Image (cartoon, rainbow, N blue to C red):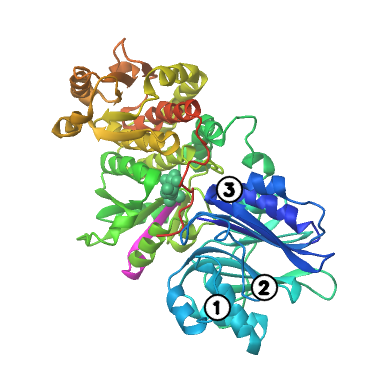
Amino acid sequence: MCGIVGYLGNNKASEVILSGLEKLEYRGYDSCGICFFDVAQEAFVTYKDIGRVFHLVNDFNYQYENHLAIGHTRWATHGKPNQLNSHPHFSQNKRFAIVHNGVIENYRELTKKYLPEVHFISETDTEVIVNMIELFVKDMTVEEAIRKTLSLIEGSYALLVIDTHHPECLYAAKNKSPLLIGTGKNGITLASDIMALVGYADQYMPIGDKTFTVCKKDDYGHYIFEIYDIIGLPIHGDFLRMDLILDEIGKAGYSHYMLKEICEQPSVIRNIMEKYLSYDKFTINPEILHLLKSCDRIYILAAGTSMHAGLVGKYLFENIAKIPCEVNIASEFAYNSLLLTKNPVFIFISQSGETADLRACLVKVRELGYKTLTITNVLTSTLAREADYYLEIFAGPEIAVASTKAYVGQIVLLAILSYCLSENKPFDLKLELSKIAVAMEAIIENRDVIHTLVKERIVKRNCFYIGRGLDYYTCLEAALKLKEISYIQTEGFAAGELKHGTIALIEEGVPVIGIISQHAINNSTRANIREVMARGANKIIISLNRVSDPSDEIILMNIEEMLSPILTVVPTQLIAFFAALELGKDIDKPRNLAKSVTVE
Ligand code: G6P
């Protein structure tokens, strides 16, 4: 969580930072701040407060001339969101300023041992880092003081430090939390995410763990940087070309990113197909196929929406590829003491590729010597880099906090993978995915029908989704989507389980949305819907045409049953979107959430 960005170069640094913070805001938006070196006053100037980046942009005094700055957008971990806890933070004598993403686990011990005299202003762990640097710099260079501090702190961090005594230097360090460096003809930008580099860097490189970076101006006026490992040896990495352009991260005329991303889903499917089709045949790295074919069980680890994609993945692996598979919530995996099979393979599914709970699992699994595959939308992410193999989703940048197109992309990729692993192809996947893209377009074009339904029947205190088999997995995702952006209390239930307790919550007018995509469960799910209707529930049924009843509210085009979650989720995404719209909620940035959860 939290986003950091720093800049040193010929451009006005504060503008680079403010534009970067707007793009990083999806990582946390409790509060934000900026600190820059004002050339005229020869001093650091800081703006920081609780609230969104647009307040900062509005309140900012643009007169300052500056070429070095750091900024931060926060998702609170230590200390509640308020002005004092906002970053940047300062050392006691105000020599150093810092922004930090991560959690310092031993900050209490360090405070006791090294900083008993320091009067801390905030409740954050970050202030400890910057004060240690100021303490150590009395007897050593800045670089040495930062390195010494890094050798003592434990936990996760991506941090940027600036020093009033060296206003043409930007220092950075990283461990576990993401940090990229980008260079362009006008300077150097460091940020938590590639999006903040767009427009300022022509090439970029992910920075490795336990490294220390110094950016400075050389004697010829060029901006240069050096990266060192933990013992001070220089590190050289390979730069990647910046392929992202500003258009891809804009709203393209849509009112919200979430709506844009929902509407992009048909083209996401087509894009993934194009990436994985070779001479009209789906193709996956043969080493990955060999690995999965020779394992005795696939263990999928994921969180949130990606975990729901994993549940569908289990169905596809078992029914199409005939490989046993189980799904574990990443944050629970460590505590479940699983009895693993002899020859397991672990698949990590993560939109961002940065979720800390998954990273912890990846480290553990690799220590145990098992092979790992990451499925992610972010090629440069930690989980992509650290797994033995990765597969990219190619869904394009997803900016709304509630995941939509990445979820669809994950399932499409899992379908392609299962299909490539299967001996007997049960259907023509290319044809079926193409049909799904068309069926999705029909839903999206007719979304006004869903909007009306939502206004009339769904904007209530609570709501239930029910379904069986694959539809149950869609219900879980649908319920998560509705609750996370509209704050309507919503549960997804296996339809048959309702009568074992939850049916007690059904009362007059409660919306119950049934999903029916498979022939085998049609009658039984409908029986469960009748049961809740008999107790006053207001039903809405989403069904595929071939299993529909004329009274169903949302009838979708027929597609392959095994792939139905790719399609049935779309009306539920729109239900969530329109419910949040009707309730006037902040759709793209729901309260308390962040898109990339980089703390365990
Ligand atoms: C956060 C996001 C969710 C996402 C989950 C897992 O909670 O708000 O949308 O599903 O993290 O993220 P990942 O990037 O690992 O898929």
Q: Are marks 1 and 2 in contact (CB under 8 Å)?
A: no
Q: Amino acid at mark 1?
A: Val
- Could you tell me residue 329's position as x and y percent? 31, 52
Q: Left or right: 417 with respect to 4?
A: left
Q: Residues within 10 Å of mark 2 (few under 14, many from 20)?
A: some
Q: Nearer the viewer, mark 3 or mark 1?
A: 1
Check disc 3 and report its element: helix, strand or loop.
loop
Q: Which mark identifies residue 94?
A: 2
Nearer to us in this view, 568 or 546: 568
Q: Which residue is mark 3?
A: 51
| Residue lying furthest top | 550
Q: Which residue is mark 1?
A: 118
Q: Residue at x 57, y 58 (%)?
A: 86
- Residue span colored magenta: 366-375
Q: Is residue 229 something one can see in this rendering?
A: no
- Could you tell me residue 360's position as x and y percent? 38, 63
**Label 2 CB-ligand 1 distance < 8 A:** no
Q: Residues within 10 Å of mark 3 (few under 14, many from 20)?
A: some
Q: Amino acid at mark 2?
A: Lys
Mark with earlier residue (3, 2): 3
Check disc 2 and report its element: helix, strand or loop.
loop
Q: Which mark identifies residue 162?
A: none
